[in-house]
Amino acid sequence: MKNIILVLSLLFFSSIQSQENRSFSLEEAIAFGLIYNRTAQNAGSDIAIAKKKQWETIALGLPQINLNGEYTNNLKQGVSLIPSEIFGGPAGEFTEIAFGTRQQINATLRLDQLLFDGSYLVGIQASKVYLEISNRAKLKTDLEVKKAIIKAYCNVLLATQQIDVLNRNLENVQKNLLDVEAIFENGLIEKENVEQLQITLASLENSLQYAQQMKIISQGLLKIVLGISNEDSITLTDSLEGLTLKKLSKSVLDNPFIIENNIDFQIAKNSVASQKLLLKLARFKALPSLTAFINGRYNGNNDRFEFLDSEQPWYGSSMVGVKLTVPVFSSFKRSASVAQARLDLKKEINLFEETKQQLNLKVASAKSSCMLAVNKFKTAQKTLKLAESIEQKNQTKFYEGLASSFELYQAQNQLYTSQNQLLLAMIDLINENTNLETLLHQTPTE
């Protein structure tokens, strides 16, 4: 039993030590996520793969050396029939002869060098474009990861803020309920007033439970986006109100939009360049290719395996040459490939032009949404102040007997709705600003 308790204790403390408590501001979360987010890491791996592919393509035009070795053991040698008259025998008869030895070893060293190939030239250009596409994709991924981190971070703050507001509202309603129950017991008000507050209390308790569950879910999503373990705990140091005010003070509404430096524009441009290379490749396949080679060869023959003996004779040979391949006729296969590549290029150019139009429209729409979000936030602030004043007045009237419990219930619901609308307006303002920032993010063309 002591051993079991010791093992369980060790497991418990080791599990505690394995958990980490991480603290993040929003900027720290973004910096952390861009390193450890799994999608961002995969995009970084794609760049490394593109670099290796680029060298793989370049290496095709560099000297290629191959060493081949072959060992043959003729378990039963083939027999050839030779006219006997060659050896002085009678005409019309044949002599059985086995040529060669039972065992042979051949070793060949060959060097090949590509001298000219149109496909290779296009491949070099394509590898550079592929690397550029991978770099652009990484930048695009980082922007999307940043946006996802901001959204997940703010959703946790939203749930936390909702829980705080609901707890304060619960405290006020519980206090009111205790006061109203005492007044009811003295027979000064009707039971309906007590029941109305009980309904309000039950509604707030349900909303609190929902907000607590949403906080757990939001924290889980944030951990996934940041690339950290579910067992780790996280603490957020920024506040929803602070982030909202920061977005208001550093508005991006007046920032210029340079479409040539936009990442989506550059990705679409890369796609056109890639399709142009495919068309060029289809055309270059009609060009001849020229390859030079040098090889050296050694042969050893023996009826028994005595190739390691110093007396074993080896016979060497070598040659040098060039190989020219000229495409002559492919039954119009190459012309069909060129026609297809030309049509694909036309489609890609159309998509590129459409992308430019969509980007301009997206920016205009995002700026409009951002302005509406700012106005919505300011309106929600004013509405909340009015709702607080109305609820306070109705609560005073209720205790003075000048307002019914239903009127107090309406005022309280209006207050709770205004509180929630302000929090949602903050989230909306942050998200719309983030969306506009992502669209206006300028990536240098070089």
Image: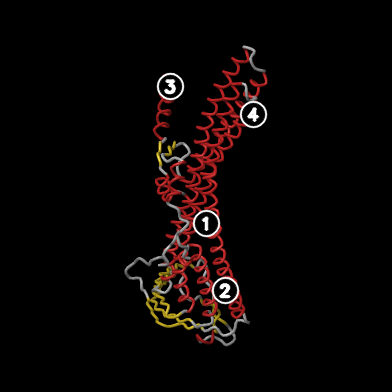
Depth check, mark 1 against mark 4: the one in front is 4
Inter-mark Cα distance, 1 to 3 = 63 Å
Mark 2 lies on residue? 345
Mark 1 lies on residue? 367
Q: Colour scheme used in the picture?
A: secondary structure
The numbered mark, 1 or 4, whose residue comes first in the sequence reads 1
Three-letter amino acid code at disc 2? Leu
Is 345 situated above or below 47? below
Q: How crowded is mark 4: few (under 14 residues within 10 Å), some or many (20 or more)?
A: some
Indicate the position of residue 342 as horizontal and vertical percent values. 58, 76
Depth check, mark 1 against mark 2: the one in front is 1
Depth check, mark 2 against mark 3: the one in front is 2
Q: Which quarter of the image is occupied by the N terminus?
A: top left
Mark 4 lies on residue? 407
Q: Is mark 2 on a helix, strand or loop?
A: helix
Indicate the position of residue 213 as horizontal and vertical percent values. 55, 34
Three-letter amino acid code at disc 1? Lys
Indicate the position of residue 69 as horizontal and vertical percent values. 42, 68
Depth check, mark 1 against mark 3: the one in front is 1
Is 384 situated above or below 284? above
Quarter of the image where one finds residue 81: bottom right
Q: Residue at x 46, y 55 (%)?
A: 252
The numbered mark, 1 or 3, whose residue comes first in the sequence reads 3
Inter-mark Cα distance, 1 to 2 = 33 Å
The numbered mark, 1 or 2, whose residue comes first in the sequence reads 2
Q: How crowded is mark 1: few (under 14 residues within 10 Å), some or many (20 or more)?
A: many
* Label pair 4/2, CB-CB below 8 angstroms: no
The numbered mark, 4 or 3, whose residue comes first in the sequence reads 3
The numbered mark, 2 or 3, whose residue comes first in the sequence reads 3
Mark 3 lies on residue? 5
Three-letter amino acid code at disc 4? Glu
